[in-house]
Amino acid sequence: MAKKRRKAPRPSKAVPATPYEIILAPDAVTDLDRLRAYDRRQVCDALEQYLRHQPTQVSKARIKRLRGLSKPQYRLRVGDDIRVMYDVHENRVEVLAILSKQDVEEWLAEKGVVE
């Protein structure tokens, strides 16, 4: 009887040893308070799930690096209609705004900083 081959262990996605600190800007706190309770919970869960350990991990749909802007650097999609704009500095994530999809372009034109 032939010996079974041992499978090589799959490389795991490395999670940084120290989680990122998530800081909400005053405008983001106001935006969060304006959301319905269900949406607020979704945003808080998404912040914890996606921004706590790998806020710069770009994906097709969830996290995008914003081109041509130095502030905000990234956008997180939460559900179909909510977008979170944020910057990453060393071990901190600064959430700048929590917006509806319709308000993003106007907010970027007003508050976005071009590189």
Image: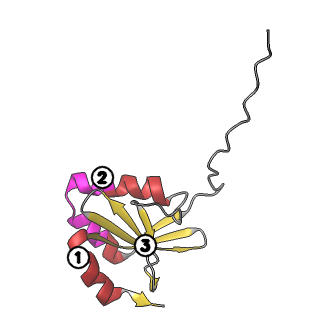
| Residue 83 percent across, percent down from the top left | 32, 67
Q: Is residue 38 magenta?
A: yes
Residues packed near mark 3 inside 10 Å, few (<14), some (14 to 19) or many (20 plus): many
| Residue that label 1 marks | 103
What number is the disc on residue 46?
none
* Distance in Å between CA atoms under marks 1 and 3: 15 Å
- Image disc number at residue 41: 2
Is 70 placed left or right of 29 in the picture? right
- Residue 9, image x and y in percent? 71, 36
Q: In this rendered view, identify the residue nearer to me: 70 or 96.
A: 70
Residue bounds of the magenta highlight = 29-42
* Outermost top residue: 1
The relative height of residue 74 versus residue 17 in the rendered view (above or below) is below
Residues under numbered marks 3 and 2 in contact, where contact means CB atoms less than 8 Å apart? no
Q: Which residue is mark 3?
A: 86
Q: Nearer the viewer, residue 99 or 102?
A: 102
Percent position (x, y) of residue 45? Answer: 38, 52
Residue type at mark 2? Arg
Q: Which residue appears at 19% of the width and 58% of the height?
A: 36
In which quadrant of the rendered image does the N terminus lie?
Answer: top right
| Residue 24 location, quadrant | bottom left
Q: Earlier in the sequence, mark 3 or mark 2?
A: 2
Type of the residue with mark 1: Asp
The tag earlier along the polypeptide, 1 or 2, is: 2
CA gap between label 3 and label 2 equals: 18 Å
Would you say the residues marked 1 and 2 are in contact, meaning their CB atoms lie under 8 Å apart?
A: no
Nearer the observer, disc 3 or disc 2? 3
Residue lying furthest front: 1
Q: Is the residue marked by circle 2 packed among few (<14), some (14-19), or many (20+) residues within 10 Å?
A: few
In the image, residue 4 sits, relative to residue 46, either above or below, namely: above
